Image (cartoon, rainbow, N blue to C red):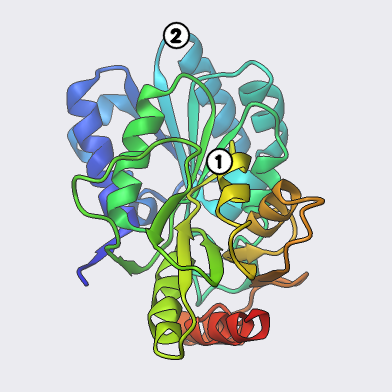
């Protein structure tokens, strides 16, 4: 499969949107070369605002821009864009339903070298808990482009989670993104795996290997964490022996919480794969962390065998 970087495609999409709509503005908190918002700055310096290491001020400034009719994209690492300005997001963006898009770059464990302080294992939980906030975790660069374009057209607060590292293309270029709709990427009759973000590819690998063992696995990409189409989650869970949720995020407050809540009272066997109640840590490679926290196709396979 072709590998692409979500951050790079995000930055390129911002530039495309900037050419199409003069109301697109971009803000960054001293990380533009990493978030790739620097691409927008190069093309539209008059519409780019470098706010320095002042995330709270960045969000408040974005709210002000939105009040003048601008569509504001505010950028930082996911751990900083959701944690440091929480009060400004809640009070300024969400309560007033402001047209501000918050981008959480280097999400999950993808900033493997910088350790717990720079790794966001709780950002989805934080943003899902805020009323009026739409939360999206695209699985590849192609879906990232579609999601960013959706966010620009949608009138209201949006949080988008983006990985730091190259990821394989899963969707075709002409794929459509529909907010709230889980997408079945592979059909199966024994187990349903609900995955989000970078874990979708691991789920597809696991499903392919499990087919050789006689276990048929349905793989579902849940890129929209909020709003969640609970009816679809139920429909895709009731005809199998059990389900597995997989996420590069804490098992508290993310995909596992959303899916298990949707299936409350259904009595469907569920296995959850994610980061337990702990922080990330430094490593030599990203893959080392995925193995350490069990965010792998191998772990999905073992859980599927247990359900089967």
- Mark number displayed over residue 68: 2
Where residue 193 sits in the image (x, y, percent)?
54, 66
Instruction: Indicate the secondary structure of the residue bearing disc 2.
Output: loop
Q: Position of residue 64 (x, y in %)?
A: 52, 16
Q: Mark 1 sits on what residue?
A: 135
Outermost residue toward the top in this view: 68
Give the vertical position of 47 relative to 6 (above or below): above
Say whether residue 285 is visible. Answer: no
Instruction: Determine whether 79 is above or below 21 in the image.
Output: below
Q: Residue at x 44, y 75 (%)?
A: 202
Q: How many other residues sit within 10 Å of disc 1, few (<14), some (14-19) or many (≥20)?
A: many
Looking at the image, which is closer to me, 167 or 179? 179
Q: Residues within 10 Å of mark 2 (few under 14, many from 20)?
A: few
Q: Which mark sits nearer the N-terminus, 1 or 2? A: 2
Quadrant of the snapshot with the C terminus: bottom right
Q: Farthest right residue? A: 265
Residue 157 picture quarter: top right
Quarter holding the N terminus is bottom left
Q: Is residue 4 visible?
A: yes
Q: Position of residue 14 (x, y in %)?
A: 28, 37
- The residue most toward the bottom is 213
């Amino acid at each position: 499969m072709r590998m692409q970087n979500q951050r790079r495609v995000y930055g390129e999409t911002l530039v495309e949107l900037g050419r199409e709509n003069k109301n697109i503005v971009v803000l960054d908190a001293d990380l533009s070369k990493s978030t790739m918002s620097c691409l927008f700055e190069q093309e539209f310096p008059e519409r780019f605002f470098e706010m320095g290491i002042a995330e709270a001020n960045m969000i408040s400034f974005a709210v002000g821009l939105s009040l003048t009719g601008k569509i504001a994209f505010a950028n930082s690492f996911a751990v900083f864009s959701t944690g440091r300005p929480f009060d400004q997001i809640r009070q300024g963006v969400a309560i007033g339903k402001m047209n501000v898009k918050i981008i959480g770059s280097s999400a999950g464990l993808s900033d493997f070298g910088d350790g717990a302080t720079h790794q966001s294992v709780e950002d989805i939980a934080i943003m899902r808990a805020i009323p009026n906030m739409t939360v999206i975790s695209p699985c590849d660069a192609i879906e990232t482009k579609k999601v960013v374009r959706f966010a620009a057209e949608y009138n209201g607060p949006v949080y988008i989670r983006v990985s730091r590292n190259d990821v394989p293309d899963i969707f075709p270029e002409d794929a459509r993104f529909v907010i709230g709709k889980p997408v079945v990427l592979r059909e199966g009759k024994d187990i349903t795996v609900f995955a989000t973000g970078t874990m979708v590819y691991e789920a597809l690998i696991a499903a392919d290997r499990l087919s050789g063992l006689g276990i048929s696995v349905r793989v579902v990409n849940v890129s929209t964490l909020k709003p969640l189409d609970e009816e679809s989650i139920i429909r895709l869970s009731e005809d199998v022996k059990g389900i597995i949720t997989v996420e590069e995020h804490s098992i508290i407050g993310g995909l596992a919480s959303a899916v298990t809540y949707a299936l409350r009272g259904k009595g469907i066997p569920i296995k959850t794969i994610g980061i337990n109640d702990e922080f990330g840590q430094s490593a030599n490679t990203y893959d080392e962390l995925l193995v350490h926290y069990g965010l792998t196709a191998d772990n999905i396979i073992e859980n599927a065998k247990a359900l089967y």
